[in-house]
Image: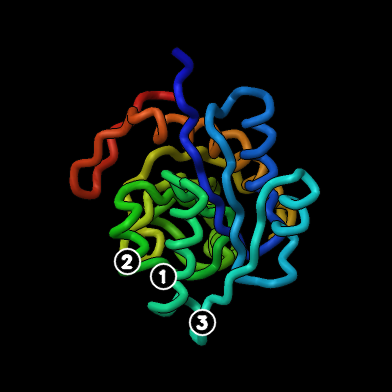
Amino acid sequence: MTRKRPKIGILGSGKGSNMVALHQALQSGQLDAELALVISDVENAGILDRARSSKIPAIFLDPGPFRTKLDEAAETRYVDALISAGVEWVVLAGFMRILKGRFLKTFHHRVINIHPSLLPSFPGLEAWKQALEYGVKYTGCTVHLVDQGIDTGPILWQETVPVLNEDTPDSLHARIQEAEHRIYPQAVQCAIDGRLTVRGRLCLTPTL
């Protein structure tokens, strides 16, 4: 009997490069799932155009009046849209709003994010710039489960990226994104396969 492919939904606010990487992994068979819906909180976001050009259902949903989070009514809209599409796992691809309340209760330990630093170092916005300004010799990216904090959830995987003497914010960010595109599909596959054990803040995962 053919195994039912789990459905994922993607939330994004920007260009959607990680959405593209995930979609390519789906097409190649590296990621065994179905991309059921893409939602953006930005009406003209590039992620929506890229999804629609690939025939992926994609919608804008009003995020409400707050700049950095969804209000309760918006959370309800987002949750209802994802449930209506049959989504089981939510994957964030540059989504710039904090998720709380009903959203995280509905998708408990089933919301995945990727952050452009080796957490817990440099949480928050423009982490590659933070790393460059601090002078570290290595940074990278982190795939983690989303909790009530900002970039504080249990860590699934990380990949290091060296900081070169000649790096600019743009060049460093570009290399971090290359690493993101490599590890994100694999980490998502591990999660949806049920190969995670979460113990408090600790997430035990097999080696990629």
Separation of disc 3 and disc 2 at Cα?
15 Å
Does residue 124 sit above or below 145 in this rendering?
below
Residue 101's spot in the image, x, y percent?
Answer: 31, 69
Label 1, on which residue?
A: 76
- Where is residue 116 drawn, in percent x and y? 55, 53
Give the residue drawn at x 52%, y 54%. Answer: 92
Per the rendering, the mark at residue 102 is 2
Task: Find the distance from the CA under tag 2 to the CA under tag 1.
Answer: 7 Å
Of labels 2 and 1, earlier in sequence is: 1
Apparent side of residue 81 relative to residue 111 in the rendered image (left or right): right
For the residues labelled 2 and 1, say whether their Cβ atoms are less than 8 Å apart.
yes
Q: CA distance from mark 3 to mark 1?
A: 11 Å
Identify residue for label 3.
Answer: 64
Whether residue 78 is situated above or below residue 115 in the rendered picture: below
Task: Write down the quadrant of residue 39 in the picture.
Answer: bottom right
Q: Nearer the viewer, residue 142 or 45?
A: 45
Q: Residues within 10 Å of mark 2 (few under 14, many from 20)?
A: few
